């Protein structure tokens, strides 16, 4: 059974999931973003079956903290990243805390995996196909063969505040191992 969350207040700080999946966009209508948002309920249903949760803004207004905003995503130019699917270990309560505490700092083991939609999709049909493939692979714990790591950013290097992977379409060859993703999320920063 899934939940349809309308407020970050409804998610306990200690809620634990394998993944928190955020749908990120600029907050205005554009075909690829619209396709992503129009498939929210489908993604939420798939995530609920797989110890994950999908989160998006109800009014397509952005939330922001020191890691995510509509200007930058972990120090990277948002125009190059958004719209995107973000897979992370960050509980949404952390965003609320950060806003309430006025830049409360970044948790030490925050991990981000970003899939920029514009790099993977040319049409709205491509977005729907990407969503189905991604969530099927996650639910079956399969390797993400359609993606490869474009960039790996380490916290503290340059403008990055958190460890992150930015994915891009994989044209032939080996994709990302599901086990590597599990290790990535569980790896502690020293």
Image (tube, grey):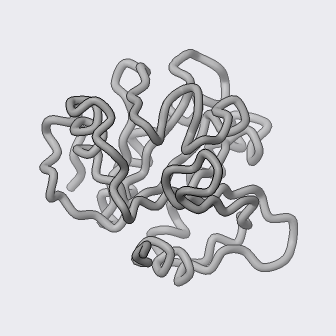
Q: Is residue 21 above or below residue 56?
A: below
Residue 136 located left or right of residue 5: right
Pick the residue in front: 183 or 137.
183
Q: Is residue 30 above or below residue 67?
A: above
Q: In which quarter of the image is the C terminus?
A: bottom left
Q: Residue 3 at what x, y percent from top left?
A: 21, 46
Please tell me in which quadrant of the rendered image residue 5 appears: top left
Does residue 134 appear anywhere in the picture?
A: no
Q: Residue 131 at what x, y percent from top left?
A: 57, 51
Please tell me in which quadrant of the rendered image residue 187 appears: bottom left
Q: What residue do we see at 28% from left, 29% from top?
A: 102
Q: In this view, does 102 lie above or below 183?
A: above
Q: What residue do we see at 58% from left, 33% from top?
A: 72
Q: Quadrant of the N terminus?
A: bottom left
Residue 13 located left or right of residue 117: left
Does residue 64 appear anywhere in the picture?
A: yes
Q: Residue 15 at what x, y percent from top left?
A: 18, 58
Q: What residue do we see at 55% from left, 36% from top?
A: 36
Number of marks present in the image shown: 0
Pick the residue in front: 142 or 86.
86
Q: Residue 104 at what x, y percent from top left?
A: 28, 40
């Amino acid at each position: 059974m899934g939940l349809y969350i309308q407020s970050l207040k409804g998610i306990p700080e200690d809620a634990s999931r394998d993944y928190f999946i955020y749908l990120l966009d600029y907050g205005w209508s554009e075909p690829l973003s619209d396709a992503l948002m129009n498939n929210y309920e489908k993604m939420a249903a798939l995530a609920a079956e797989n110890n994950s949760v999908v989160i998006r803004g109800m009014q397509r207004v952005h939330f922001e903290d020191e890691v995510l905003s509509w200007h930058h995503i972990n120090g990277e130019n948002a125009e190059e990243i958004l719209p995107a699917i973000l897979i992370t270990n960050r509980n949404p309560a952390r965003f609320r805390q950060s806003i309430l505490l006025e830049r409360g700092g970044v948790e030490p083991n925050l991990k981000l995996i970003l899939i920029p939609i514009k790099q993977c999709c040319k049409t709205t049909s491509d977005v729907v196909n990407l969503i189905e493939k991604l969530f099927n692979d996650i639910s079956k714990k399969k390797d993400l063969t359609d993606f490869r790591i474009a960039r790996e950013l380490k916290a503290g290097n340059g403008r990055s505040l958190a460890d992150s992977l930015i994915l891009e379409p994989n044209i032939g060859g080996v994709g990302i191992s599901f086990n590597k993703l599990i290790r990535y999320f569980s790896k502690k920063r020293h």
